[in-house]
Every structure is written in C-alpha cells, then in structure tokens.
Image (tube, rainbow, N blue to C red):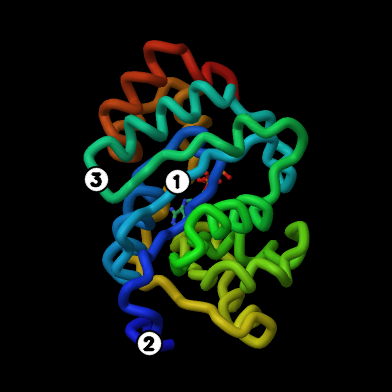
Amino acid sequence: MGLTDSNPAARRIGVFGGAFDPPHRGHAVLAQTAIAQLQLDELRVLPTGQAWHKTTVLSSADHRVAMTQLAFADNDRVVVDARETQRSGPTYTVDTLAALKAENPLAQLFLIIGEDQASRLRSWHRWQELADFAIICVAARGDSTGAAGTFDALTARLPVLVRLEMPPTPVSATEIRRKVASGQDIAPLVFDSVARYIAQHHLYQSA
Ligand code: ATP
C-alpha cells in the first residue's frame, strides 16, 4: 500500500507487543525496521501480561519491563509501555489497540508482529477487529520458528497488511533462555546491558 496516502498530519505510532523474556537483537532489528520503513514517530513497546497464547511460564513482569527498557534505552523513538503487565487477567491486543486509539484519536496505528505470531493471528481474541484500529505489519523471522507463506494467507483475509522488509535475524528468546541455562555465551544475541541484568538477577538458570 502507499504509505504516503494517509493523512500527513497524523502521528504514526507503531505498537509492538511481546513477552520480551528476554528482549534480544531480533526485537531490536524489527523495531529499527518498523521505525524506518513505516516512518514512525513513536514505537510503543508493550511487554505482555499473562500471555494467553503462550504455554511457557514467563519471568516476572518487573524483570521483563526492566530488560525491555534497557534493550531500547538508546532508541529515542521507543516508549516502553507497561500497561499490559498491570492488567489483571488475560491481556488482549485488540483491547490495547482500542485504548491507544482512544488516547490518540488522530494517530495512525501500526501493529508490528513477527511471522510466527501472524500465523496464529486467527486464534487471537476478536482478531477481525485488529484491522479496525491498526494497519497490521508482518516481519519474516528467518529462523526455525518462522511460518513461510503466512503473509500471503493473511493478505486474503485482512484488507490492510504490510510486509516489513527485515534482514533475517535468527534469534529467539527460547534459544537465549536455553543457552543461559546450559552456561553458554549469549553476548551475540542480546545487548550487554540485558546480559548483565540476566546475570545479576540469576534469570534463566534452569531451562
Ligand atoms: P520465545 O522464543 O520465548 O517464543 P520470541 O523470541 O519469539 O520469544 P517474543 O517476545 O515472543 O520473542 O516476540 C515478540 C514479537 O517479536 C513477536 O511478534 C515475534 O514474532 C517477534 N520476533 C521475535 N524475534 C524475532 C526475530 N528474530 N525476527 C523477527 N521477529 C521476531
């Protein structure tokens, strides 16, 4: 789609949710890609609360929010927003988008997701309404969790969908947790500040 077609005065806000357990370089590359390609004024990064679509037990919200703040500290377009961690019960992206739209009625919202999440989009709560609030933007993951062809399958069902042209960044939080648990080096996969936080707080000692 022509990204210049929308109202030039509208603030362009990206919405990027995730467990961030821990945040890693794949998240950083995705954030940079979204900001550049979508010409975002702001990227709202939202660590999830009780991630309803995941079966893994997450680290505490305080740790995940703190690590997310460290990981994005140098990016002045990023605002880490902890609202989903403060909600009791399950948190749904559609509710977060509705709230952000109510707070920023003139803004154009862009929902940023990786391809593995996109492949599960139809299981999300009120998924058909997501496109009422935001343009949905999907990045290929370039690792084993990717789901090739998802983008094409979704295009048929969602009217407004943008593919993020992200360099393949094969890293996942799962891999990082496993490496920490088995004493392997995670330096290439996370920012130094996040690696230090993980060590200081003894996170991911068991897989
Ligand atoms: P886990 O391994 O625990 O499932 P994850 O690495 O997928 O975690 P999340 O915090 O669940 O990290 O991801 C948040 C969002 O970032 C999701 O939309 C996910 O698809 C996307 N994402 C994560 N890693 C990458 C990557 N390497 N490339 C592209 N997108 C990614």
Tag 3 residue: 76
Q: Which structural element holds mark 3?
A: loop
Q: Is residue 157 above or below residue 194?
A: below
On the image, numbered disc 1 is attached to which residue? 45
The CA distance from mark 1 to mark 2 is: 25 Å
Q: Which mark is residue 5?
A: 2
Q: Amino acid at mark 2?
A: Asp
- Residue type pointed to by label 1: Val
Q: Quadrant of residue 58?
A: top right
Vertical placement of residue 198 versus 91, above or below: above
Q: Quadrant of residue 149?
A: bottom right
Identify the residue at image location x=53%, y=78%: 161
**Number of marks in the rendered image:** 3
Label 2 secondary element: loop
**Residue 35 at x, y percent in the picture:** 31, 61
- Write the residue at 68% across / 64% down: 121
